[in-house]
Amino acid sequence: MPDVLLVLVLLMVFWFPIASVSADGGYEGCPSSRMTLPLCEHGRLVHWQAFVTANGTLGGEGYPQCVTATIDGTELKTESVRVKVGQLGGRASQNAWEGGGLTQTLNGDGRQVSIGAQVAVEYFSRSDRRNLAGGLFELLVNDVVIAREEVGPIETGTFQSMYIQGRTTLPKDAYILSIRIRRPFLSTPDTPAPYQYVRRVEIVGSATSHCRKDAQ
């Protein structure tokens, strides 16, 4: 009988495949199902490139900024990207949404993924009660909008945070991921206007199924 039990144990070890699970729930040797894209490092953008729309601005000279934001008296540990978007010049038109954002080129693998961003709006002015529109946040893949969220008029002295998310199927080659932020009002160095923040960007895929197969 002991010999039979030994044979059964050996069969279980060498015959049945065993998948190795990592601490974050993924599978060893496979890409993680959640990838966070770094924004800033030592006060500078990492991998991202800034852009502006035709008559847009990110706030003028010195923008975008990499800052450590403070929310409700708590300083965040990671740097966020801060801009102050709007129309660059001319007569302000509420029909013209202008601004800019961030973009970078990544490699796709044909999977369906969810792309999300933690964003925020902040405004403070002791006297000005105009130009309060928080802005329109959009996520784009190859110039196609997959998610958007608009923040309307924001009260002075407040900080609004939100998470925008959209699903898409990535191409099997390079693609462009963009975060676009626009407002239908002027933004100049001398004009009080809301700040917009990008605090985190992540790509969440359904990698577990095919990784489990590869790991077996």
Image (cartoon, helix red, strand yellow):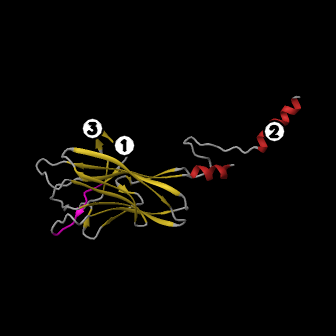
| Residue that appears at 55% across and 65% down | 172
Q: Can residue 29 be seen in this view?
A: no
Judged from this view, the residue extending furthest toward the left is 127
Magenta residues (range): 82-90
Q: What element carries label 2?
A: helix
Between the C-alphas of marks 1 and 3, the distance is 13 Å
Q: Mark 2 points at which residue?
A: 10
The answer to whether 69 is drawn above or below residue 96 in the figure is above
Which circle's residue, 1 or 2, is located before the other in the chain?
A: 2
Between the C-alphas of marks 1 and 2, the distance is 50 Å
The answer to whether 186 is drawn above or below residue 122 in the figure is below
Which circle's residue, 2 or 3, is located before the other in the chain?
A: 2
Please state, as top left, top right, bottom left or bottom right, where the N terminus lies in the image.
top right
The answer to if 192 sits in the magenta stretch is no
Give the foreground label among 1 and 2.
Answer: 2
| Residue that appears at 43% across and 66% down | 142
